[in-house]
Image (cartoon, grey):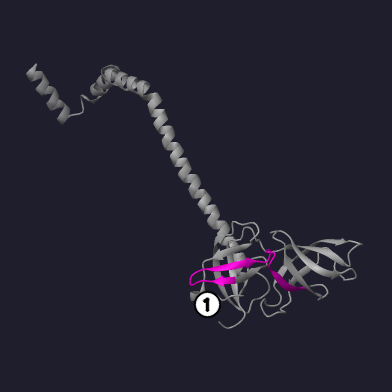
Amino acid sequence: MILFSVLLLVLDTTTTALQPFKSYLMDAAKPLYGLADMPNRLLKFGGDRTMTKEGLVVKNAQLEAEGLVLRAKVQKLAALTIENVRLRELLNASAPINERLLLAEVIVVSPNPLLHYVMIDKGSEDGVYEGQPVVDAYGLFGQIMEVASHSSRVLLISDQRHAVPVQLDRTGARLIAEGMNDFIELSIPNVALTSDIIKGDVLSTSGLGGIFPVGYPLGRVAEITHDEGLPFSIIKVKPFAHLDRTRHVLLLFNRDG
């Protein structure tokens, strides 16, 4: 047997005569390989069956965690995209701007519904001064009422303490728009019944008073009420500025300081 084995080895290494026979033996032995591996496969199958529930729980937890991370990333990307659009709108706001500008971010909103103000992240170190006009991407937003070194308080045009000289774009008539502690509504008091003002008229700053530059949009006339018992009309204006949700604003430098 030893001599026969040596002879087979010599023939296999020096000739190809045994190749067909080797192929036949490999095909014939294939079921034996499967049978020999059967214990290992049975053990693996049994382990998978006994670990299925725990494995699924762990895998499900991993997938949920990955899903939360991905959703957070998508939301962050969406928020950054929206913020980028808003910043582009802000920098292109209103008519051509000749004044020096300063971009600021809203960092605090008044919790008191009777006090309409926000805090921004710019202060005297950035050249901010009291009375400075503030706009957002859509229109007049308010004015600086208090200044600290690195922050400032902005009084919104919707605050009942605020008033701004405006004019009708259509006729040039000069009026005063006042806040009503309502983010979506301003009022124009003391408008004569005979005044030429109609629903849809656009109001912008008149430049009178020396605080707000001329030409910044304020809002649109939303409602006109004529009360026979009163000598004046009741005018309601919808402001253009997004007073309750704007995050970035522009500070206008219409004087030195």
Q: Nearer the viewer, residue 189 or 204?
A: 189
Q: Dividing the picture into quarters, in which one does residue 137 lie?
A: bottom right
Residue 72, x across and y down, in percent: 49, 47
Q: Is residue 211 magenta?
A: no
Q: Residue furthest bottom?
A: 256
Identify the residue shown where x is 17% and y is 27%.
12
97 lies above or below 21: below
The amino acid marked with disc number 1 is Gly
How many numbered tags mark residues here?
A: 1
> Where is residue 211 shown, x and y percent of the image?
66, 77
> Looking at the picture, how far across and down is residue 102, in whole percent?
55, 73
27 or 81: nearer the viewer = 81
In the figure, residue 118 lies in which quadrant? bottom right
Outermost residue to the right: 228
| Residue in the image at 21% along x and 24% along y | 18
Task: Choose between 192 and 89: the one closer to the eye.
Answer: 192
| Residue 120 appears left or right of 239 | left
Does 179 appear above or below 97? above
Q: Is residue 165 magenta?
A: yes
Disc 1 marks which residue? 127
**Is residue 136 visible in the rendered structure shown here?**
no
Give the extent of the magenta segment. Answer: 145-168
The quarter of the rendered structure image containing the N terminus is top left
Tell me the crowding category of disc 1: few under 14, some 14 to 19, or many 20 or more residues within 10 angstroms, Cα based: some
Q: Residue at x 9, y 23 (%)?
A: 6
Which image quarter holds the C terminus?
A: bottom right
Secondary structure under tag 1 reads: loop
Identify the image quadrant of residue 60.
top left
Left or right placement of residue 149 versus residue 39 in this view: right
